[in-house]
Amino acid sequence: AQSVTQPDIHITVSEGASLELRCNYSYGATPYLFWYVQSPGQGLQLLLKYFSGDTLVQGIKGFEAEFKRSQSSFTLRKPSVHWSDAAEYFCAVPGAYSSASKIIFGSGTRLSIRP
Amino acid sequence: NAGVTQTPKFQVLKTGQSMTLQCAQDMNHNSMYWYRQDPGMGLRLIYYSASEGTTDKGEVPNGYNVSRLNKREFSLRLESAAPSQTSVYFCASGVGQPQHFGDGTRLSIL
């Protein structure tokens, strides 16, 4: 069955430092992969998505993600974080029947920014 | 601003009461979704609608019903609320996958 794991529940980085958030998936074929961000008290926003092709995907707000098939990973990165990046980040993969509509979310990684 | 609007933002119900959560989007998206978010569990899909007039079950549909009233609106109904349905509910819309989410409805069932 498809699943997604975010091994880090909470990460704290200093403002201006680089960020790396991990995501591992279990999927029977080449997956679609997504990263979402949820700011406090708000709904989620799609940051970026990988469907096929180049394994380095650019997203909004200066984020990028790298897909590594050999490691079943989809790692979110940002070169220099801002205080406004403090939020919860969710990785997601398609659910049953490879449907991008029925995506499965990870349990999330909460990002705190140290001034 | 364009987006997804959910009402109400907060609601407290007693066990056994019914209520409908409303959702409207103005981005002309075909697909709309209802999720619930519980601590440490990410988001779980309750129902989704690929287009006007169609709905399909997600991971956790029991205890819920939905109506896709038109292209803009997608409502979620709890017929007989139970404490296990205490959660934050999010509506979303998109093309192919959920892209835009509302700000959520915090629902408590006593």
Image: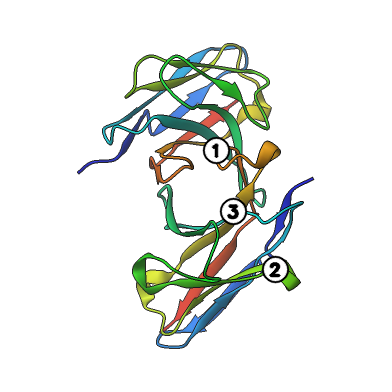
Who's the residue at 32% across and 24% down the image?
B72
Q: Which residue does the numbered mark 2 point to in the structure image?
A: A69
What residue occupies the far front of the structure in this picture?
A: A53
Who's the residue at 55% across and 60% down the image?
A52
Q: Chain of mark 3?
A: A
Mark sitting on residue A32: 3
- Label 1 – label 2 distance at C-alpha: 22 Å
Label 2: element kind: helix
Q: Which residue does the numbered mark 1 point to in the structure image?
A: A101
Quadrant of the snapshot with the N terminus of chain A: top right
What residue occupies the far right of the structure in this picture?
A: A1
Q: Which x, y percent locates residue A18?
A: 48, 85
Q: Which x, y percent locates residue A34?
A: 54, 56
Mark 3 or mark 2, which is nearer the start of the sequence? 3
Q: Which x, y percent locates residue A88?
A: 51, 61
**Would you call the spot at circle 3 few (<14 residues within 10 Å), some (14-19), or many (20 or more)?**
some
Tell me: residue B16, above or below residue A24.
Answer: above
Callout 1 and callout 2 share a chain: yes
Discs 2, 3 touching: Cβ within 8 Å:
no
Please name the amino acid that badge 2 sits on.
Arg
Please name the amino acid that badge 1 sits on.
Ser
What residue occupies the far left of the structure in this picture?
A: B1
Q: Which x, y percent locates residue B98?
A: 46, 42
